[in-house]
Amino acid sequence: MFPGSGGNGKERRQTVRTLFGVLADGTEVSSWSLENGGTRLKVLDYGGIVQSLEIPDRDGRYANVSLGFSTLDDYVAGSPYFGALIGRFGNRIAAGRFTLDGETHQLPLNDGDRSLHGGTEGFDRRVWDVEPFTEGPDVGLRLRLTSADGEMGYPGTLEVTVTYTLTGGGDWRIDYEATTDRATVVNLTNHVYWNLAGEGSGSVHDHELEIAAARYLPVDQSLIPTGELADVAGTPFDFRTAKAVGRDLRVAHEQSLHCKGVDHNYVLDKGVTVRPEPVAVLRDPASGRTLGIATTEPGLQFYSGNFLDGTLVGTGGRTYRQGDALCLETQAFPDAPNQPSFPSTVLRPGQTYRTTTVHSFGRS
Ligand code: BGC
């Protein structure tokens, strides 16, 4: 047990470390429990995984609103990135290949003939160094790792620090930072699967979602963006005004056929910003729980949990079926290393990659 900061009398503020499991090579994996401002978060040093995130409903009843597993073995055996930190490059890279400064780099293929979420051994499968901290009203964890030059095919030694902060107001803030010793590409994100009614409670199709984006990136059959920035107006992908997630999911649009629903990157109206700006709101009318997302990033991958197929048993012992959760991944645009018209994801020596995403929880 690792006792962190004490309480402030009213709100409980604490950080507790426990053993979660042991990897095949003997490495011990810890679970870090944080509580602040009414939010409870459990994070594994394996993959920086959010193993559980509990928030109250309008009557003060807590539920774990993030899909996950109860054992380390389940995560190791094969997780569709439940709650994980994604790197070095989130989302897909066509043919797992890109050319930078005249040199072509081949990445391992782990999604048909594409590279997905950093490759076969991405940051979601690394054990991070974790250091707890308390700063003013906030508590948090600093997660660090070094990704070697050539790891998963990417050039440059990447030094990564991801800071998870639980603020005094109960927000979960993520600050991503990275530096390199050689030009590379970087696109870090987190892959929480949200179900505001509680994981394992059924479909999220009644949740209401709003996304501040007038355009999205259409994809080809392999879910690689075509390069076009298309209007959402008149398509099932229009979430400019809050609507039920499931309302248009069965509309027979060519783009939905590629991915059994929505699995698309939204071009956020605000573009890249220095400070996080609000981009999405998710609300479960039944429990009243709400999630607001603010980010500095230009894109948001909305994935409607299409490939959950009832074969995985989650934290609460229930199976996860199609549409039982959704992901809202703040990020750069997929396949950006091959698409010069997209915002650049290149990081060079001397530069610091810096992005921030804030998740705010409320009741309505
Ligand atoms: C992707 C999906 C993929 C899921 C799990 C999401 O970020 O957009 O296509 O199935 O991750 O791997």
Image (cartoon, rainbow, N blue to C red):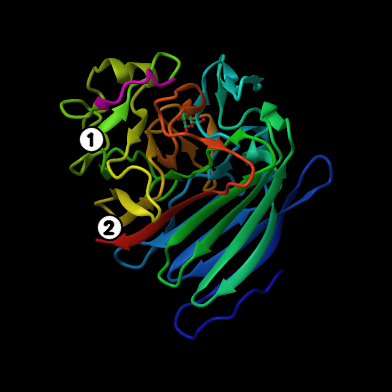
Total tally of numbered discs in the picture: 2
Query: Tag 1: Cα neighbours inside 10 Å, few (<14), some, or many (≥20)?
Result: some
In x, y percent, where is residue 142?
Answer: 62, 60
The vertical placement of 92 against 23, above or below, is above
Instruction: Give the residue number, with chain letter if any, for mark 2.
Output: 288
- Residue 247, given in percent of the width and then of the height, sits at 21, 33
Q: What label sits on residue 109 in the rendered view?
A: none
Residue displayed at 65% across by 22% down: 107
Q: Residue furthest bottom?
A: 9
Prevailing secondary structure of the magenta residues:
loop
Q: Is residue 148 above or below residue 66?
A: above
In this rendering, position of residue 28 left or right of residue 242: right
Segment tinted magenta in the rendering? 224-230
SS for dot 1: loop
CB of mark 2 near ligand 1 (< 8 Å): no
Camera-side residue: 124 or 70?
124
Quarter of image, res 246: top left
Query: What crowding class fits label 2: few (fewer than 14 Cα within 10 Å), some (14-19), or many (20 or more)?
Result: some
Q: Which residue was labeled with disc 1?
A: 214
Amino acid type of the residue tagged 2 in the rendering: Gly
What residue sits 64% from the left and 40% below the top? 123
Whether residue 74 can be seen here: no
Question: CB of mark 1 within 8 Å of CB of mark 2?
Answer: no
Say if the magenta span includes residue 225.
yes
**15 or 162: nearer the viewer:** 162
Residue 204, position as x, y percentages in the image? 33, 40
Find the distance from the CA under tag 1 to the CA under tag 2.
27 Å
Query: Quarter of the image holding residue 235?
Result: top left
